Amino acid sequence: MTMIGGLDVHRQQITFDYVDDEGLVHWGQIRPATRKTLRDWLAKHCPDGDGEFAMEGCTGWRYVSEELAAAGVGVHLGDPAEVAALRGPKKRAKTDRWDARLLRTLLLEGRFPESWIPPAHVMEVRTLGRLYCALMDERRSWQQRIHAQLFHQGCPPITALLSQAGREALAAAELSAAGRQYLDTAQRRIDELNADIAPLRAQLVAFARHQPGCQALPARPYGVGWLSAAIIWAEIGDARRFRSSDQVVRFAGLDITGYSSDAKRAPGHLARQGSPERRWAAFEAAKCAARPGSPDYVDYHQVAARKEGKRPTLAVERKILRRCYHILRELGATALAAPTAKPNKTAA
C-alpha cells in the first residue's frame, strides 16, 4: 500500500497526517517550516518516495510541492475553497491536525479537488509578472499622491509627470516648504521604481520573444504585446485544463455576479476573484480596440454608444482572453514549453 497523507502548511510548522503501508495512522508536526527540515523529514519517512500527499494551494505550497516532487513523492494540490466546501458543517473545533486528516481522507477516498501545478519556468515568469504589476501600482500611487498634493496647495494640474516637461512644471509649481519636500521625496521614489521597472520589463519581453506560447499571442489578438503576452500566458497556464473559454473568463474574475443567498454583495458586479495581473494585462490590450485598425473597433464603439465608463473595454477584454485561450489550447503541450533560447535580459 502506498503511503497516503495530508499536509497542512503554516509559516511556523507543517502538520502531517498519513497512513503507512501497514494501515497505521501517523501524525505530527514538521518544525520549522523550511525546505531543509521538510527534506530531512521526507528522507526519514519516505526514503523510497512511495507516497502520495495532498495539501491546499495556500502560501507556501510551492516549496513543499517542489521538495515532495524531488523526493519522488506524488503531489496533489487542492483549491482551498473547494476543500472547505467538502469539509461540510463544522461539528468540532477546527485544528491543524483536523485539516491534515481531512486532506488525507479526501485523497484516500478519491474526492480530493485537484488543482494544476505549474512547471518551474511558468512559476518564475508568473512571479516576475506579479512583481512588475506591484511596482507599477506603487509608482502609480506616488503619482496620485503628487496630484493630490498639487491640488491641496492650489496648483494647476500637471499631466505627464514622468516626462521632462512634467518635471519642469513640478519644479516651477508654487508650493510651501513642506509641499516641496513632499514632491521631491515622491519623485525620488518614482525614479527608484523606474530603475527596477525598466530591466524587469525587458526581462519579461525577452522571455516572451523566445517562448512558443507567448510568441503565438501577439500575432493574433490585436493589442496584445510581448509584455501582455508573457503575463497572460503565465497566468492562464495550461489552457487544456479549462473546458471552454467561458471558464477562462470566469477564472479571470470577469464574469458578472448573480444572486446568492449566502452573500451580501449585490448581483451585477464583476467577480474580481481571479488574478488581478491577468485582468490588468488583458485590459491594457483591450484599450487598443479604440483604434481604427482594431478588428474590435466597431464592436467597441457600439458598446460605448450604449454603455459608459470601462464597459466597452471590459467587453473587448473578455474577447481577448477567449482568443488567447483558443490559441494556447490549439498549441497543446507546446504552449508550455521552455524558451527555445536563453532570453536576453537586456532586450527591449
Image (cartoon, rainbow, N blue to C red):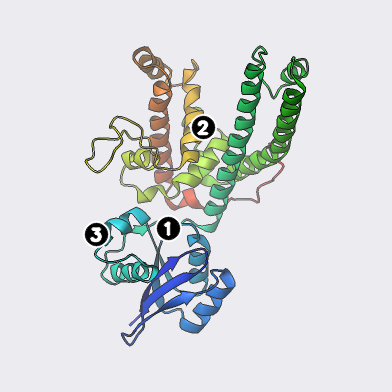
Badge 2: how crowded within 10 Å, few (<14), some, or many (20+)? many
* Residue 213 coordinates in the image, percent (x, y): 50, 45
Residue drawn at (61%, 45%) of the image: 207
* Residue 145 coordinates in the image, percent (x, y): 63, 27
Circles 1 and 3, Cβ within 8 Å, touching? The answer is no
Q: Nearer the viewer, residue 340 or 311?
A: 311
What residue did someone put label 3 on? Answer: 88
Q: Is residue 280 above or below residue 52?
A: above
Q: Is residue 300 above or below residue 73?
A: above
> Mark 1 or mark 2: which comes first in sequence?
1
Quarter of the figure with the N terminus: bottom left
* Residue 147 coordinates in the image, percent (x, y): 63, 21
What residue did someone put label 1 on? Answer: 57
Is residue 43 left or right of 158 when viewed as pictured? left
Residue drawn at (36%, 67%) of the image: 95
* Circle count: 3
For badge 1, the amino acid type reads Gly
* Residue 250 coordinates in the image, percent (x, y): 34, 40
- Of badges 1 and 2, nearer the viewer stands 1
Q: Secondary structure at mark 2?
A: loop
Circles 2 and 3, Cβ within 8 Å, touching? The answer is no
Q: Secondary structure at mark 1?
A: loop
For badge 2, the amino acid type reads Val
Is residue 118 left or right of 187 when viewed as pictured? left
Residue drawn at (65%, 44%) of the image: 203
What residue did someone put label 2 on? Answer: 224
Quarter of the figure with the C terminus: top right
> Mark 2 or mark 3: which comes first in sequence?
3
